[in-house]
Amino acid sequence: MRIRPARPDDAPALAALFAANRHDALTERQRAEQGFVQGSFDEAALRAMAGAGNVLVAEEAGALAGLVCLAAPGDVPDPPPPVAALLAAQDRLEWQGRPLSARRWLLYGPVVVGAGYRGKGVARGLYEAALRSAAPRAEAVVAFVERANEASRKVHVDGFGMAVLGGYEVHGRAYEVVAAAARPSA
């Protein structure tokens, strides 16, 4: 598996992977078993994010296996409600004894792994690459996970050891905020 920064010409494949794993594209059983991503990232948005260096991709034999996004909180134009709520909660959410608002952090996610690549270390590879990529710009990566997305919580909190900082609700949906320290390359 090779992990690299996404290129703008990856946008169609990124959009297809994202669309196949959106909450609304999956059955209730699929969401429970594999997790899901939220929001709407079309080709234009993903092309811009790749061009800004905010997406990492995992490739296996030239095929797109997965993706992860990283962005500075101030670089999210017109943030969707869950992101806006996270930004609004920065003063009360603490990372290592200080409010997030007093820290340098990057928004981590969404993370998407293609169906044929699950259980093969792609998510962990993307996570580790994201932590290394974040290190020059941030102390931590911070994500929100919908409480109904137990598969994502198991991966990020139970599997990767991300710390739960607190939570919030948006339009009747509950979210947990999780974080991990950025790690410089060895």
Image (cartoon, helix red, strand yellow):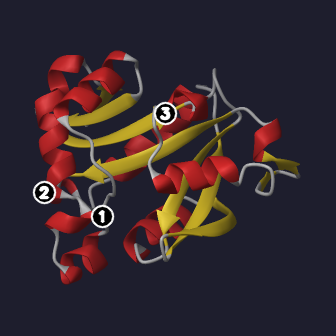
Q: Please give the name of the residue rendered at 17% of the width and 26% of the height, measured from the top-left corner.
A: 10
Crowd around label 1: few <14 · some 14–19 · many ≥20 (10 Å): many
Which sits earlier in the primary sequence, circle 2 or circle 1? 1
Using the numbered discs, state the Cα–Cα distance from disc 3 to disc 1 in whole angstroms: 21 Å
Residues under numbered marks 2 and 1 in contact, where contact means CB atoms less than 8 Å apart: no
Q: Residues within 10 Å of mark 3 (few under 14, many from 20)?
A: few
Quarter in which the C terminus is drawn:
top right
Instruction: Provide the residue designation for mark 1.
Output: 36
> Could you tell me which quadrant the N terminus lies in?
top left
| Residue 74 in picture, x, y percent from top left | 59, 30
Q: Residue 116 got which mark?
A: 2
Is residue 148 toward the left or the right of residue 142 in the image?
left
Kind of residue sitting beneath label 1: Phe
Q: Residue furthest bottom?
A: 29
The image quadrant that residue 4 belongs to is top left
Which sits earlier in the primary sequence, circle 3 or circle 2? 3
Q: CA distance from mark 2 to mark 1?
A: 15 Å
Instruction: Tell me what residue is drawn at x 55 percent, y 37 percent.
Output: 131
How far across and down, in percent of the image, does residue 166 sit?
70, 66
